[in-house]
Amino acid sequence: MAANSDIVTIRNVTKSYRRGSQIVPVLEDISFSIQSGEFLALMGPSGSGKSTLLNLIAGIDKVDSGSIIIGGCEITTLSETELARWRAVNVGFVFQFYNLIPVLTAYENVELPLLLTRLSRRERREHVEAALEIVNLADRMDHRPSQLSGGQQQRVAIARAIVTDPAILVADEPTGDLDRVSAGEILSLMDHLVQDFDKTIIMVTHDPRAAEKAHIIRHLEKGLLTDR
């Protein structure tokens, strides 16, 4: 993909949920684009629709109306099976609470997404070691999550997110469970992935300090994009 081209295009996206007999609107007529290699922060109060929008971009949830085009693929037209295949190749996920499997080592946690591919065992090892090297944890690959600090666990989670070399990373409050120093290290790592590996990152955060690391900040208020 050419530099600075739009990798994500969101057009007139609307999303609501049913709560009993009520229809609760979450997002209303959302339209914007994200260029390849951008670091975007989505901010807004709880209930503003940030995580819902992130899940729609990641293909975890489906729009009620509108379209989402990522890397030239109109994901809103894909079946559940097609979406699962698309996610496995194109999206890396980073969560607030790491979502690591406690009984597996850092190496095994990072390798998990590759077990769904046709890579050989040797190729998987090369990919895992490269990802752990990028996050500066090659010397901790045999440690389990309980043997790692919160910041180290989040770096393992980031290594797992990038091991398949996805087009975009989606991060939901990635520093929300970390102290200030560890949070700063994670944000610097994410900036490194953008600057040196041309990753596109979409991050939901409540923290203005975290948002400052992003190239672009967009605000959601009650399901609407605002200009502030």
Image: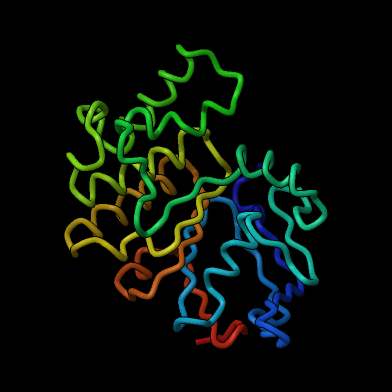
105 horizontally vs 5: left or right: left
Observer-nearest residue: 228 or 78? 78
As rendered, which of 116 and 209 lies closer to the eye? 116
Q: Quadrant of residue 52?
A: bottom right
Closest to the observer, 46 or 202: 46
Q: Is residue 145 left or right of residue 2?
A: left
Compared with residue 121, is residue 216 higher up or lower down, i.e. above or below?
A: below
Q: Which residue is depicted at the point 27% across and 63% down?
A: 177
Would you place residue 194 above or below residue 22 in this image?
above
- Which quadrant would residue 134 be assigned to in this image? top left
From what the image shows, is residue 81 above or below residue 131? below
Looking at the rendering, in which quadrant would you find the N terminus? top right
Residue 84, percent from left and from top = 67, 43
The location of residue 140, given as percent across then percent down, is 21, 31
As drawn, 219 above or below 60: below
Residue at left offset 35%, top offset 64%: 213
> Which residue: 31% across, 35% down?
103
The way the protein has been coloured in the rendering is: rainbow
All told, the count of numbered labels is: 0
Query: At 51% across and 80% down in the image, what residue appears?
Result: 219
As rendered, which of 181 and 192 lies closer to the eye? 181
Residue lying furthest front: 20
Task: Give residue 173's position: percent from left, percent from top.
Answer: 39, 64
Indicate the position of residue 60 as horizontal and vertical percent values: 63, 56
